[in-house]
Image (cartoon, helix red, strand yellow):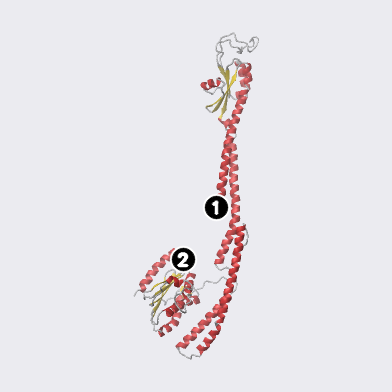
Amino acid sequence: MRWALVRVSLAVTVMVVLAFAVPLGLVVKELARDRAFADAERQAAQIRPALAITTDRDQLERAVASSQAGGEERLAVHVPGDGGGGGGGAARRGADAGPGPHDAPTGSPREPYGIGRSRAAPHDVETARRGRSAVTSVPGGYALLQPTALSTGEFAVVEVYVPHRAVSNGVTTSWAILAAVALGLVVGSVAVADRLGLRLVRPAERLAKAAAELGEGKLGVRVREGGPAELRAAAVAFNSMADKIVQLLAGERELAADLSHRLRTPLTVLRLNAASLGEGPAADQTRAAVEQLEREVDQLIRTAREQGEQKERPPLGCDACDVIRDRMDFWSALAEDEGRTVRLAGVDATVRVPVARPELAAALDAMLGNVFRHTPEGTAFAVDVHRSDDAVIVLVSDAGPGIADPDAALRRGHGDGGPGSTGLGLDIVRRVAESTGGDVRIGRSVLGGTEVRVWLALDGRGGPRRRERRSRVRGRVRRRLRP
């Protein structure tokens, strides 16, 4: 958002600057041109009084030399001839010129002549001599041709040379100032937009960071209200939502603790009844099951009673093979009573997984309990453990009728086990697998029934590489399980 605002402000400011600076630069150029030609007209006007008085060459040369443009050799005068002598208004050249400067000469007809350095073409001068002012291009600049009427009715032409540097005098400096002002406006608008964008972005970043921390389980995080009204309202709504979540979780913890505590009474009765069973394998197994159930209930109560934000705990882990062997010792006795064939493979080595021992045991009990609960007596089942570079695969397969809708079976509360099924067993397995970055798949086993494949990632991360290795390991596992 911040950079989007900066880009929009930059685009708008550049367009506005161009819309004003370009025409203003052209106006400055035209003003400099007009100023140069106005100065040329002023220089030409200084010669007009002299031409109105006399056309004597010497006097005109002195008048041209005394002017600023003449001193810089930028002024020239083109005087026409008298055409046949005796024209009134032609002055004598000497000091004994007779009674007046406008008396007719007594000599031969006067030829046209020019004074000063001329740069204009002869035909341009002849055109101006007809009484029309003109500006013509000459090497190095322009020539202003200004006709001036003489007393004889003819026109002398005053030529003023205007170099290019005079036409563009001050234009470059003005353009540089305009460019600097435009650049300053652009930089200033970008800086202001960046500050405004930062004012909008920082509250949004705080809100996003708080949402991420809340998703990680940090229930005490709250957002400081700031920024525009909309973001302040969002921060208020977020804080209210976080407070509500804390209240709901506290209520759930209390409810779980109360429900778990209510189980103590039937557990006490079960323990007393198990103690009166006497001796024997079945009695020992029953007492062990009751003790384990009591431990699980106590753990539920302790967990539910934990208040506040959880502290950072060291990474948990256990030996998956040791847990599987321990749980299989428990379930093998029941399998023997029901006439089930059990196969256990891959549990000889030590294979550590990033899962707490009680959680892994609960996941195994959920899968094995489903086998006993949802398959007929005498149905064979197998537990296989396979290890790759980055994961441990636990396969629980049976020769039962299979699961009609595997996707529904993995959804919490949607188990299709019929009476007595809560639909939470496979969800427990799924959560254990996903806590490591793995997953759970249900398919058809080589025994003909259901296969539950639990992928426990060792590095706790997922990704394309891990999925590729999964497919390769899955192929090797299936080939090994083929009869």
Q: Mark 2 or mark 1: which is in front?
A: 1
Does the rendering let one see residue 147? yes
Residue 238 place in picture, x, y as percent: 59, 64
Write the residue at 53% across / 88% down. 272
The image quarter in which residue 304 lies: bottom right
- 38 left or right, relative to 335: right
Residue 265, picture quadrant = bottom right
- Of 59 and 301, which appears nearest the observer? 301
Which residue lies at the image location 60% right of the left edge and 18% below the top edge? 149
Q: Quadrant of the N terminus?
A: bottom right
Residue 416 in the image: x percent, y percent? Answer: 44, 75
| Spatial separation of the CA atoms under disc 2 and disc 1 | 33 Å
Name the residue that disc number 1 marks: 4
Residue type marked 1: Ala
The quadrant of the picture occupied by the C terminus is bottom left
Q: Nearer the viewer, residue 47 or 115?
A: 47
Q: Amino acid at mark 2?
A: Gly
Q: Quadrant of residue 257?
A: bottom right
Asked if residue 174 is positioned above or below residue 382 in the image, the reply reads: above
Which x, y percent locates residue 76? 58, 21
Label 2: how many Cα within 10 Å (few below 14, some 14–19, many 20+): some
Q: Residue extending furthest top? A: 106
Please, what secondary structure does the residue beneath circle 2 have? loop
Q: Which residue is mark 2?
A: 462
Q: Residue at x 41, y 66 (%)?
A: 469
Spot the residue most to the left. Answer: 483
Residue 228, placed above or below residue 345: above
- Judged left or right of residue 482, residue 200 is right
**Position in image of residue 455 (x %, y %):** 44, 71
Q: Secondary structure at mark 1?
A: helix
Q: Residues within 10 Å of mark 1 (few under 14, many from 20)?
A: few
Name the residue rendered at 39%, 69% in the picture: 474
